Amino acid sequence: MTGETNLNTLLGTMSADLIDDLFVFVTLKDRAMPDGLSPRMMFQEAEGITLILTQAQAQAHDLPFEFPCRMITLNIHSALEAVGFIAHIATELAKQDMGVNPVAGFFHDHLFVPDGREQDALTVISQIAAAHS
């Protein structure tokens, strides 16, 4: 199950899928996880638990949230130790005045981009892949 480490291969063979739904970031400082909540990601930080979940879930559980965003999954099995992959993509998105919150899963990297900028991000990703293929 070893992922790809070669930067040119990663950039040139990646494709991207826009995941349906609007996502948000939530923090639970001293609260237990509400029943029925199914976050896309959960990460324990010193200040509390960060959750990425749908905006609908956050609203249904009356959780304050930030950064309404869209999730883009990069369809290449990138190795966890791959060097420069996300940095290259983030740099190209920054040139378009777009921030990105990347999350590495075991098999794929996922980009959370501002709601309304998802098509711009997909265009940049496609251009990167074309330039490296």
Image (tube, rainbow, N blue to C red):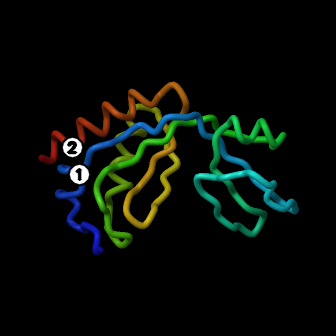
- Residue 127 lies, in percent from the top left, at 23, 36
- In which image quadrant can residue 105 be found? bottom left
Of residues 94 and 2, the one nearer the viewer is 2
Q: Which residue is mark 1?
A: 11
Task: From the viewer's perspective, tell me whether residue 91 is left or right of residue 39.
Answer: left
The amino acid beneath tag 1 is Leu
Mark 2–mark 1 Cα distance, whole angstroms, equals 5 Å
Is there a contact, CB below 8 Å, between mark 2 and mark 1? yes
As drawn, the residue found furthest toward the left would be 133
State the count of labels: 2
Q: Secondary structure at mark 2?
A: helix
Task: From the viewer's perspective, tell me whether residue 102 is left or right of residue 91.
Answer: right
Residue 129: numbered disc: 2
Q: Secondary structure at mark 1?
A: helix
Residue drawn at 31 percent across, 50 percent down: 75
The amino acid beneath tag 2 is Ala
- Residue 68 lies, in percent from the top left, at 63, 35
Label located before the other in sequence (2 or 1): 1
- In which image quadrant can residue 126 be found? top left
- Structural crowding at the residue carrying mark 1, measured as other residues with C-alpha within 10 Å and reported as few (<14), some (14–19) or many (≥20): many
